[in-house]
Amino acid sequence: SQQGEEDPQALSIQEGENATMNCSYKTSINNLQWYRQNSGRGLVHLILIRSNEREKHSGRLRVTLDTSKKSSSLLITASRAADTASYFCATETADSWGKLQFGAGTQVVVTP
Amino acid sequence: DAGVTQSPTHLIKTRGQHVTLRCSPISGHKSVSWYQQVLGQGPQFIFQYYEKEERGRGNFPDRFSARQFPNYSSELNVNALLLGDSALYLCASSYYSSTDTQYFGPGTRLTVL
């Protein structure tokens, strides 16, 4: 079974709108990372948030982490067509040193 | 600085054959991890190597093996290929491991016919 699961599976929005996707996980984590993948190519690292952090920002991206609910969210503000991609959360747990466990991803389509 | 590089980009093999995939980490990074991504799914962890030693192994059969060289580059070998091995194989590097960001290469697309 997967450690992380993203919700929704797919999201379609227009340019300028905000996109929010969620990630839930099952066991305690060291950190949680968000990645973007364009059309089956390599993964691009977006943000790493550690278990003792609650919120991080990077440009138009905002990530929150609620360890009590074992969940995280990724917000993309003022979306652009170039944000069209699949977004994955990946967790690293205390007993899996260096092993990232990915969810199935959220497919985001931003239309002009 | 160059990112993580992988070769080849694409590969077509037939069932039963053997394949070797190669990865060069970001300069200065000592850890390399391998992931398999089947179409429509998230990546699945295969191996992690740090300082030439295997530090982690995912739930993959013994047909999968890997090694890391003194220059920290790595090879992933798959023997007796099955149709189900068709996937995007991703390599990631980090300086250390735990709590470090892992940077991914562009992947090798393997098709088994």
Image: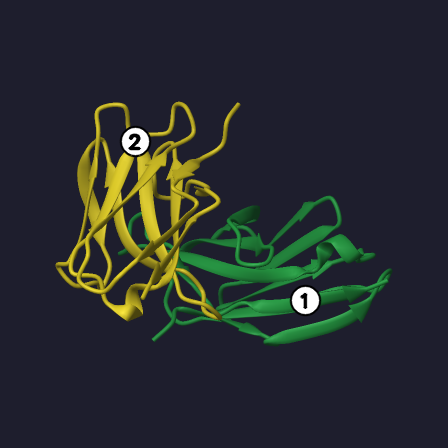
B70 on left or right of B40: left
> From the viewer's perspective, is residue B69 above or below residue B49?
above
Q: Which residue is mark 1?
A: A108
Q: Position of residue A6 (x, y in %)?
A: 54, 71
Disc 1 element: strand
The percent position of residue B20, horizontal first and vertical second, equals 25, 45
Q: SS at mark 2?
A: loop
Q: Amino acid at mark 1?
A: Val
**Would you say A63 lies left or right of B14 here?**
right
- In space, the residues marked 1 and 2 are separated at their CA atoms by 34 Å
Please name the residue shown 72% across and 67% down the image.
A109
- Colouring scheme applied when the structure was drawn: by chain
Chain label for disc 1: A
Of all chains in the rendering, the one displayed in yellow is: B
Label 1 neighbourhood size at 10 Å, few (<14), some (14-19), many (20+)?
many
**Number of marks present in the image shown:** 2
In the rendered structure, find residue B73 and report the number of the disc placed on it.
2
Where residue A47 sits: x, y (%)?
58, 48
The numbered mark at residue B70 is none
Q: Residues within 10 Å of mark 2 (few under 14, many from 20)?
A: many
Q: Nearer the viewer, residue A42 or A103?
A: A42
- Residue drawn at the location 30% of the way across and 31% of the way down: B73
- Chain drawn in green: A
Q: The disc numbered 2 marks a residue on which chain? A: B
Q: Which of the 4 image quarters holds residue B75?
A: top left
Q: Which quadrant is the N terminus of chain A positioned in?
A: bottom left
